[in-house]
Amino acid sequence: MGSGVDGDADLLAQARELGRAIAEQDWVLLSGGRDAGIMHASAQGASEAGGLVIGVLPGADSRESSDFLDIQILTGLGDARNAINVLSSDVVVALRGGAGTLSEIALALCAGRTVVALGRNDADTFAGMGTVIPTSTVDEAIAAVRAALARKG
């Protein structure tokens, strides 16, 4: 989960690297599915590494979809689709983003999901609300996801 806006080249490169790493673990990448920002960059990385990429889109128009999706789910729900993204995830990895990303973090914590905060400087904001694991690198994030999945069984 993260910014749906293009612009920060380093952040987009990190999202692409994260997508690739997720695919290399044989995990499924589920994102907001749009053709912009972290959604698109992570989908590209996962697709290039041969992973399965699912996008849960806010609208009902497939032209908004990233070209790197294997499965697109057109909801027509707008930002309410964030609940689908979170509830369909075993672990949520949150990069930098705006209000939508914050809503996904809050929904994840309310639903008892572990949140891996990659490169976010606000992880302490969520202290006591659930499991938030601050990480600085993709390798740390993958290790945190792996540990959360092991705890979950």
Image (tube, grey):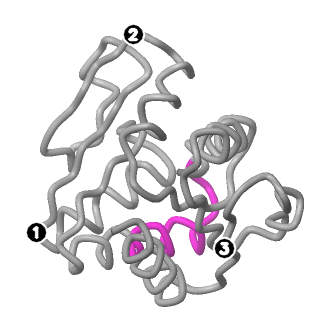
Question: Position of 32 compared to 83: left or right?
Answer: left
Q: Secondary structure at mark 2?
A: loop
Question: On the image, numbered disc 2 is attached to which residue?
Answer: 76
The reply to whether dot 2 and dot 3 touch (C-beta < 8 Å) is no
Question: On the image, numbered disc 3 is attached to which residue?
Answer: 133
* Residue 74 x, y percent position in the rendering: 28, 19
Residue most extreme to the right: 125
Identify the residue at horizontal 68%, vertical 50% (top origin). 97
Question: On the image, numbered disc 1 is attached to which residue?
Answer: 50
What span is in magenta?
A: 6-18
Q: CA distance from mark 2 to mark 3?
A: 32 Å
In the rendered view of the protein, which quadrant contains the C terminus?
A: bottom left
Identify the residue at horizontal 17%, vertical 72% (top origin). 26
The image shows residue 98, relative to residue 84, as above or below, that is below
Corner quadrant of residue 56: top left
Q: Secondary structure at mark 3?
A: strand
Q: Secondary structure at mark 1?
A: loop
Corner quadrant of residue 114: bottom right
The amino acid pointed to by label 2 is Gly
Question: Position of 112 compared to 26: left or right?
Answer: right
Identify the residue at horizontal 51%, vertical 16% (top origin). 78
The earlier-in-sequence mark between 1 and 2 is 1
Identify the residue at horizontal 58%, vertical 48% (top origin). 112
Magenta span: predominant SS is helix
The earlier-in-sequence mark between 2 and 3 is 2
The amino acid pointed to by label 3 is Ile
Q: Nearer the viewer, mark 3 or mark 1?
A: 3
The image shows residue 117, relative to residue 103, as above or below, that is below
The amino acid pointed to by label 1 is Gly
